[in-house]
Image (cartoon, coloured by chain):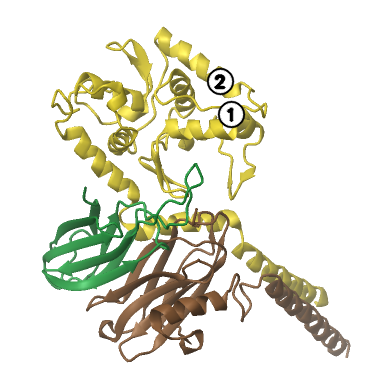
């Protein structure tokens, strides 16, 4: 089962040269490995430890989150909108599960 | 003249202390956390559940390989805008008063052919989030008119005030007697008068990263009361939900909620 | 003549009252250590040093406090599980190599690292803060400087479960 990712641009259709935020939220419990379940057993760590963002194939950001990042995490970036293109976000967690989402950035 | 200067200096001292005191007002600071969460996110975890719910709603699933698009939530099959504000209500096909969760479950059984034990709670919650997103900014209009609705409303009211369990407490103990007092940083919400409270369910709770419906909230309250929680889709849950939603009648829903 | 006397009394009264006001301000400052210069609320430099060494190979004294790094976080978080953090560097995009974030009292003080490639030096996310402690943004520049901005976050319910 792949990891769900949502990508949003703010503003949705930026003008050329305008600052645009790329906001990504990922569905993941981000288990830190320090929590215990109802019986008192440690819940094994399972969190996203790698997120890569590319624009038309070129890497623009790489995040290394850890147990200190909240569940269903937000990853938000800012860039100058110079041209339309496709943003792709891929992520991987400790168990090897992956997720991928693409979103087209269109200039106004 | 000298009195004026003294007054000015005293005022200055007060202002200085006031400025420092205001920095620490926990209510204002707690609001700042929520505001920052909403402003800089652009996309919230609740949006994940809405998207997941939409997929589950529209995909053909179950032994009957059908989607839930023909489900009647109170406005007729396929009409979904604003339905959350009209639930719980009596449904003729099941001859029961049903809330959002149990109506989703009914349709999964009737339309898709799932057996009751096959229904996953997480699927019901996701679908509830999707339907909630279609009721955002709509008014709560729940009005018990059918005799079954009125009977269940009376039950809900009775349960709300019923002191029971090892702590001899009721819902009203916190939400009426101690309303406004603090549990942590936030005060006990005024369920009977504040129309925003009941109407922000289903919601994403960012204090424990859980997607909850009203049923989850009521069950959690029962554990605070020291009593075993009523089952999902059971009569006490629907009764309390009906009672609480009627108190919010007239309020504008903020859905899906994003709360502590 | 009378006017002269009244003026002297006025000034003295004012000076006395102002000193009182200043003393009051300083006292308030001491009572609220987060506002005073120096130690931040919940500081734990030993634990932080461990995290810095592990991630950056440098120590706390290699960090330079810089007003060019802007860290936005709430001062009180009623839920430590979802503390919004926004970091922005007032530097040209091609000078910033990475942004790191630490919290002194987390078991693992590193909250995250971000490597940016050509986009604006900005990052926002939600982090878990275990207990009241400073959250620290460290901006790593291409010429090897480590710029620091810190802010204490008071946590009422810890974020690590």
Label 2: state its secondary structure: helix
Q: In which quadrant will I find the N terminus of chain B?
A: bottom right
Q: Quadrant of residue C112?
A: bottom left
Q: Quadrant of residue A30?
A: bottom left
Q: Quadrant of residue A50?
A: bottom left
Chain B is shown in which shade? yellow
Q: Which residue is mark 1?
A: B171
Q: Which residue is mark 2?
A: B159
Q: Position of residue B204 (x, y in %)?
A: 39, 44
Chain A is shown in which shade? green
**Which chain gets the brown colouring?**
C
Q: Position of residue A17 (x, y in %)?
A: 18, 73
Q: Position of residue B213 (x, y in %)?
A: 40, 35
Counting residues from the start of the chain, the first of labels 2 and 1 encountered is: 2
Answer whether labels 2 and 1 touch (C-beta < 8 Å). Answer: yes
Above or below for A3 versus A54: above
């Amino acid at each position: 089962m792949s990891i769900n990712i949502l990508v949003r641009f703010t503003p949705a259709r930026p003008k050329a040269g305008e600052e645009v935020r790329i906001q990504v939220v990922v569905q993941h419990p981000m288990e830190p490995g320090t929590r215990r379940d109802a019986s008192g057993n440690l819940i094994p760590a399972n969190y996203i430890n790698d997120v890569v963002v590319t624009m038309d194939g070129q890497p623009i950001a790489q995040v290394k989150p850890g147990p200190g990042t909240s569940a269903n995490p937000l990853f938000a970036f800012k860039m100058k909108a110079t041209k339309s293109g496709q943003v792709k976000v891929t992520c991987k967690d400790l168990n090897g599960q992956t997720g991928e989402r693409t979103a087209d950035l269109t200039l106004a | 003249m000298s009195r004026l200067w003294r007054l000015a200096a005293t005022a200055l001292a007060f202002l200085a202390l006031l400025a420092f005191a205001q920095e620490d007002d926990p209510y204002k600071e707690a609001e700042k956390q929520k505001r920052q969460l909403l402003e800089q996110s652009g996309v919230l975890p609740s949006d994940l559940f809405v998207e997941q719910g939409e997929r589950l709603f529209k995909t053909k699933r179950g032994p009957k390989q059908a989607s839930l698009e023909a489900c009647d939530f109170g406005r007729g099959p396929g009409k979904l805008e604003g339905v959350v504000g009209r639930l719980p209500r009596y449904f003729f096909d099941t001859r029961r008063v049903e809330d959002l969760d149990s109506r989703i479950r009914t349709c999964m059984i009737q339309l898709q052919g799932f057996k009751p034990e096959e229904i996953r709670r997480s699927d019901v919650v996701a679908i509830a989030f999707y339907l909630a997103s279609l009721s955002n900014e709509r008014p709560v209009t729940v009005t018990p008119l059918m005799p079954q609705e009125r009977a269940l409303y009376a039950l809900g009211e009775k349960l709300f005030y019923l002191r029971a369990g090892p702590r001899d407490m009721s819902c009203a103990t916190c939400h009426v007697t101690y309303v406004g007092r603090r549990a942590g940083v936030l005060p006990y919400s005024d369920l009977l008068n504040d129309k925003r409270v009941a109407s922000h369910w289903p919601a994403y709770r960012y204090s424990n990263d859980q997607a909850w419906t009203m049923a989850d909230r009521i069950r959690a309250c029962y554990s605070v009361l020291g009593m075993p929680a009523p089952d999902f889709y059971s009569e006490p849950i629907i009764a309390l939900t009906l009672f609480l939603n009627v108190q919010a009648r007239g309020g504008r829903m903020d859905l899906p909620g994003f709360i502590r | 003549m009378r006017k002269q006397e009244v003026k002297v009394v006025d000034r003295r009264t004012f000076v006395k009252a102002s000193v009182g006001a200043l003393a009051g301000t300083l006292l308030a400052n001491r009572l609220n250590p987060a506002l005073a210069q120096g130690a931040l609320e919940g500081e734990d430099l030993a634990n932080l040093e461990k995290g810095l060494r592990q991630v950056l190979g440098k120590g706390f004294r290699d960090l330079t406090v810089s007003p060019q790094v802007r860290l936005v976080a709430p001062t009180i978080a009623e839920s430590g599980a979802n503390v919004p953090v926004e970091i922005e560097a007032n530097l040209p995009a091609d000078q910033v190599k990475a942004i790191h974030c630490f919290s002194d009292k987390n078991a693992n003080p590193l909250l995250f690292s971000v490597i940016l490639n050509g986009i604006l030096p900005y990052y926002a996310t939600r982090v878990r803060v275990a207990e009241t402690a400073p959250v620290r943004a460290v901006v790593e520049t291409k010429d090897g400087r480590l710029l620091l901005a810190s802010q204490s976050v008071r946590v009422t319910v810890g974020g690590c479960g």
